[in-house]
Structure formats: structure tokens, C-alpha cells
Image (spheres, grey):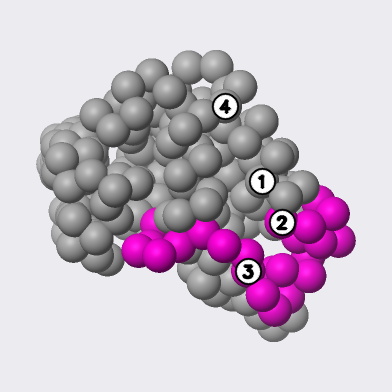
């Protein structure tokens, strides 16, 4: 079964004015689709033609196939990114996630400062992440198409795409403004909380 482009979990105009429909049409409909098409082209007629995305990533890494690893990584990262956005997002998470942000960052403002620094100072293209590492929340970033798949003890909770195609139409080269909009108006804390609960449940099983 070929890898497919997942639909967005919202209409393309629902994130405006913080992310425009033009950006979503380009980013999801063109860039993300291109990564999907490239992975399918690279695996067509091969042993991985019917494999799921995580299997493709793990095999590509084992074989040292950097082209497939980067293309598949970008598909995986974007699949995770779209649910990290939601209309009317931002604000402060409650429940256990909110308690852990207070414990590990001193509160929402401490987390936002750490995440902004990581996202804004990341050199070149990549992704900023909120991750559950062991029993602690940490902020990190990865370059280009790198993913957290297969990284022992690290569970992704929330990510922000800091490739320029994620924000250039709306913010030009002003990445800090985009990161502010992500944190204050777009971040989907419900999705992050679901990821946290799932990870904790798997560890308890």
C-alpha cells in the first residue's frame, strides 16, 4: 500500500490570520505531497513498497539510505505537525501536562521561552520539538528531515516546522513572529496531552 497524504484536520482558512490558506495550500498540498510522491517513487517495486512509514524509516536508517530517510522523515514530521495546529489554539494546557510544564520549565512562560529560543536559533531548516524524555519534558530541535522515530526514551508531544516554506508567505524571513503565532494562537495542547497520556499508558502496560 502506497504512502498517502493525510487530509488536514481543519479547513485551509481556519487558521487565519496566523497561518493563511495560501500557506496551507502550498505547504500541505505541494511540499508535503512532494515528499509523499518521492517516498512512493523510491520504494516502488522494492521490498518496502507495502511497508508503513515507520518501517521505511527504520530500514532506510539501517541501510544508510539518506535520500529515502530524509524524504520519509519529512512525510512523518509533517503528518505529526498538522494535528499540532488547531483553530483557537495556544493558551495554557491543564491537567498533567500543565503540571509537568510547571515542574520542568517553571510554568508556561518558561516553556515558551525555552521553545522560542530553540526554534528561533535553530540554524537552517528543521523542527522544534516538545518531547517526553524519560519522565521529564524537554525541548529540542532536529535538522532537515530527521525524526524522533526509533530514538529510545524520547516521545514527541508537539512540534513546530521551522523550514522557511512553513511561514515565508505569511511572515517572510521573520521566524520569531511565526514561532510566537504558533505558541500563542495555534499550538494544539489537546493533541500534546493525548500524546503524553498514550506514552504513559504504554510505559505502564
Mark closer to the chain start, 1 or 3: 3
Whether the residues at callouts 2 and 1 have beta carbons within 8 Å, the answer is yes
How far from the left and from the top, in percent, is residue 133? 74, 53
Instruction: Characterize the local packing of mark 3: few (<14), some (14-19) or many (20 or more) Cα atoms within 10 angstroms.
Output: some
Which residue position is annotated with label 4?
Answer: 120
- Identify the residue under disc 1: 112
Residue 169 percent across, percent down from the top left: 24, 29
| Residue 169, numbered circle | none
On screen, residue 26 above or below 12? above
104 within the magenta span: yes
Marks 3 and 2, the one that precedes in the sequence:
3
**Magenta region: which residues?**
85-108
The mark nearer the N terminus, 4 or 2, is 2
Could you say whether the residue bearing mark 1 is in a helix, strand or loop? Answer: helix
CA separation in Å, label 1 and label 3: 12 Å
| Residue located beneath label 2 in the image | 108
For the residues labelled 2 and 1, the Cα–Cα distance comes to: 6 Å
Question: Which numbered marker is on residue 93?
Answer: 3
Residue 122 placement, left or right of 98: left
| Magenta stretch: includes residue 95 | yes
**x and y, in percent, of residue 172 in the image:** 32, 22
Spatial separation of the CA atoms under disc 3 and disc 4: 22 Å
Amino acid at each position: 500500500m502506497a504512502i498517502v497524504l493525510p487530509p488536514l484536520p481543519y479547513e485551509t482558512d481556519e487558521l487565519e490570520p496566523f497561518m493563511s490558506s495560501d500557506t496551507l495550500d502550498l505547504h500541505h498540498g505541494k511540499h508535503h505531497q512532494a515528499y509523499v510522491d518521492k517516498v512512493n517513487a523510491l520504494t516502488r517495486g522494492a521490498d518496502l513498497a507495502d511497508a508503513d512509514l515507520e518501517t521505511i524509516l527504520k530500514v532506510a536508517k539501517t541501510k544508510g539510505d539518506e535520500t529515502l530517510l530524509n524524504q520519509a522523515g519529512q512525510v512523518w514530521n509533517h503528518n505529526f505537525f498538522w494535528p499540532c495546529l488547531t483553530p483557537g489554539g495556544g493558551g495554557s494546557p491543564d491537567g498533567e501536562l500543565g503540571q509537568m510544564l510547571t515542574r520542568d520549565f517553571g510554568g508556561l512562560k518558561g516553556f515558551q521561552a525555552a521553545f522560542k529560543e530553540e526554534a528561533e536559533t535553530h540554524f537552517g531548516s528543521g523542527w522544534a520539538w516538545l518531547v517526553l524524555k524519560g519522565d521529564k519534558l524537554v525541548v529540542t530541535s532536529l535538522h532537515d528531515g530527521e525524526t524522533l522515530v526509533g530514538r529510545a526514551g524520547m516521545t514527541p508531544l508537539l512540534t513546530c516546522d521551522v523550514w522557511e516554506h512553513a511561514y515565508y508567505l505569511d511572515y517572510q524571513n521573520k521566524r520569531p513572529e511565526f514561532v510566537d503565532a504558533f505558541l500563542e494562537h495555534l499550538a494544539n495542547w489537546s493533541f500534546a496531552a493525548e500524546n503524553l497520556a498514550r506514552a504513559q499508558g504504554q510505559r505502564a502496560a
